[in-house]
Amino acid sequence: MASVPSLAASVHQRVADALSAALPEAGSADPLLRRSDRADFQANGMLALAKKLKGNPRELASQVVAGLPADDLLAEVEVSGPGFLNIKVTDEAIVRTLAARAADDRLGVPYAENPGTTVIDYAQPNVAKEMHVGHLRSAVIGDAVVQILEFAGETVVRRHHIGDWGTQFGMLIQYLEEHPHELDHRASSPDTAASGEEAMSNLNRLYKASRALFDSDEEFKTRARRRVVDLQAGDPKTLALWQKFVDESKIYFYSVFDKLDMEIRDPDVVGESGYNDMLDETCRLLEESGVAVRSEGALCVFFDDVKGPDGNPVPLIVRKSDGGYGYAATDLSAIRDRVQNLHASTLLYVVDARQSLHFRMVFETARRIGWLNDKVHAVQLAFGTVLGKDGKPFKTREGETVRLVDLLDEAIERAATVVREKAQDLTEAEIAERSAQVGIGAVKYADLSTSASRDYKFDLDQMVSLNGDTSVYLQYAYARIQSILRKAGDVRPVAHPGLELAPAERALGLHIDEFAETLRGVAETYEPHKLAAYLYQLASHYTTFYDQCPVLKADTPQTVENRLFLCALTARTLHQGMDLLGIRTPERL
Ligand SMILES: NC(=[NH2+])NCCC[C@H](N)C(=O)O
């Protein structure tokens, strides 16, 4: 319940106070404290400050040292180099701070100071189409960001902006009308409910068949085009047929999200069709305000800095010359809805970087008309492309986009090999469960551990490797700690602030203490990869600690308890961090 000030924050406060006492004209200058390998912390703010005020940095640094209070936080402070401070905290302060974290169910992580409402647009596949790796990225990154923001106390509204509208449905609907029993299999009994795979293969079959007709039969083509008009006019019979495609697709989507161990709630699925009623009004408002103008019959928004290769401006087309609405009109309407009805303070879009120009134009349009402003801003969390091992966009040998389900199944299969190798007396059911947790975790972690904006190579061998920056490595670290805690039996983890700590214990403890600040940064910049990096370092610190400091065989009973305490807190921190990334931490592997 209570937030625990980190050691860094406490040291920062002491140094900042001493600094403003030594140099009142510096006001509340930042001592620029950071973690350092040499000491625990280094403060180098005195350098720039002395330069600015024409003083001597070493002298200023010495004055700051003289002004530091003598208490049980600081063990050693020395002036070094041109005027840095090297600061070591006491072992006691480390253990006390960690004990305070352990006593809190949030590990002492504070809530954000000014939480708002974030509407996050992520996991948005397209109806009647396969999901591919691009949809994986949006889902995985989006889900992690949702968890991280909610943990920080932000109100989060999820929106899955699925592609469920457009001219492509004319052909499908017309085909279904003419072959009415093609999607009937489920109606008879719920027991025969199609699995996700079946649903997708039904949709694929319908797509191929209707495409073939569309390409070969002129009359069918005409009927299909008329369907588009009926659909846009809201003809009930046409809508009912369209709905069948949406429902069938949802069976498939949900099965994939389920495999991804991700909770997607139906009311949060508000696809493009959900904004139909707003499109006219959106256009009217844009035109009346002068933000959009008519050009060659279309309603357009122009930008000075968006030009085609011929140097002519490329506008954002809000309404086409034939009166049809496209992707932009829908996104602008969605902004109105999210701002005015959902009261968003932040709009977040987890969408492929290849759509960045679209969002730049949409956001700028919304700013011009005032839907976005100082109080409401929009951010595209643009992600890069998933590449194959050859460094080219991920494709099958036949040059087709890789089906997401196939990838996930393959990851789970590879994970099974790893799990089997290590498994000691696990049942087949347990192996299956672990394999899914390890395989899906591996895929998520590979995605989340590189900065979202960068492309990354989808390399399953690397992903399920036990050595290196992988989720399996983290899951093993967690499982190993659990096994030690089980072996400890009746001996409980207890913090003993009086003990002298070994270097590896200090390094581990200081790193655990950085969890809260890491999370704060990650929530502010939407960079889950920094949480992944933190967790990897945590596991590495733990490994060093484990190699250097015997736990159950330590010299004194107090040291055993204290080391168990470090083990337990490492495990909880790992678990919490992995949970925020959407990755399971099995108790045994
Ligand atoms: N509000 C949005 N435009 N969200 C992104 C939608 C992504 C789109 N369905 C796609 O598969 O590419």
Image: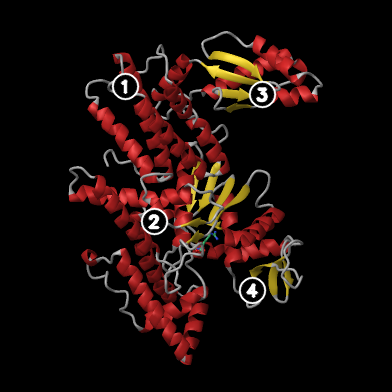
Callout 2: SS = helix
Q: Nearer the viewer, residue 473 or 547?
A: 547
Q: Is residue 455 left or right of residue 48?
A: left
| Closer to the eye: label 2 or 1 | 2
Disc 3: CA contacts within 10 A as few (<14), some (14-19) or many (>=20): many
Of the two numbered discs 3 and 2 in the rendering, the one whose residue sits closer to the viewer: 2
C-alpha distance separating marks 3 and 2: 45 Å
Q: Which residue is mark 3?
A: 31
Mark sitting earlier along the chain (4/2): 4
First along the sequence among labels 3 and 1: 3
Q: Quick one: quadrant of the C terminus?
A: top left
Q: Nearer the viewer, mark 4 or mark 2?
A: 2
Sequence-wise first label, 3 or 2:
3
Residue at mark 2: 460
Marks 4 and 1, how far apart at CA: 67 Å
| Residue of label 4 | 320
Residue 100 percent coordinates (x, y): 43, 20
